[in-house]
Image: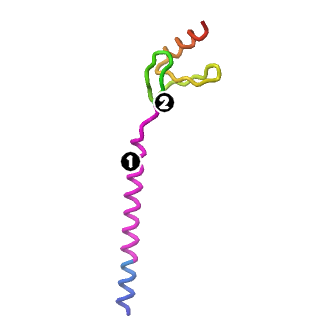
Amino acid sequence: MLRLIFFVFLALILYSLLRFFLKAMSSSEKKRDRKQDPEELVQDPYCQTYIPKGSALKKRVAGRDYYFCKKECLENFIQNKKS
């Protein structure tokens, strides 16, 4: 009887450890997959270049958001809008 209790206890410990390691491996794979998601690209309205939205310069002009690749494009766009 004591052996049976010992083997059941050992099986529960092994099951818990196996479940813990499998869960840790799957969560690390999910993190790796999230990092590989492509970033949204936006087009600079002045020079027509596509740039990642996270690194673009954002400017709200006349109630609309515009994204620019560099400060010069932003300034030229605003100057042309005023003209």
Q: Position of residue 38 (x, y in %)?
A: 42, 37
* Residue 16 drawn above or below residue 63: below
Q: Which mark is residue 32?
A: 1
* Residue 67 drawn above or below residue 80: below
The span from disc 1 to disc 2 (Cα, nearest Å) is 21 Å
Q: Residue at x 35, y 89 (%)?
A: 3
- How is colour applied across the structure in the image? rainbow
Classify residue 6 as left or right of residue 82: left
- Position of the N terminus, as image quadrant, is bottom left
Q: Secondary structure at mark 2?
A: helix
Q: Position of residue 30 (x, y in %)?
A: 41, 51
Q: Residue at x 39, y 75 (%)?
A: 13
Figure disc tally: 2
Q: Amino acid at mark 2?
A: Lys
| Depth order, front residue of 17/52 | 52
Q: Secondary structure at mark 1?
A: helix
Residue 26 falls inside the magenta stretch: yes
Residue span colored magenta = 12-40
Residue of label 2: 53
Q: Position of residue 27 (x, y in %)?
A: 42, 55
In the current view of this chain or complex, which residue is farthest to the top?
83
Res 81 → quadrant: top right
* Residue 40 drawn above or below residue 57: below
Q: Position of residue 2 (x, y in %)?
A: 37, 91
| Depth order, front residue of 47/73 | 47
Res 15 → quadrant: bottom left
- Position of the C terminus, as image quadrant, is top right
Q: Amino acid at mark 1?
A: Arg
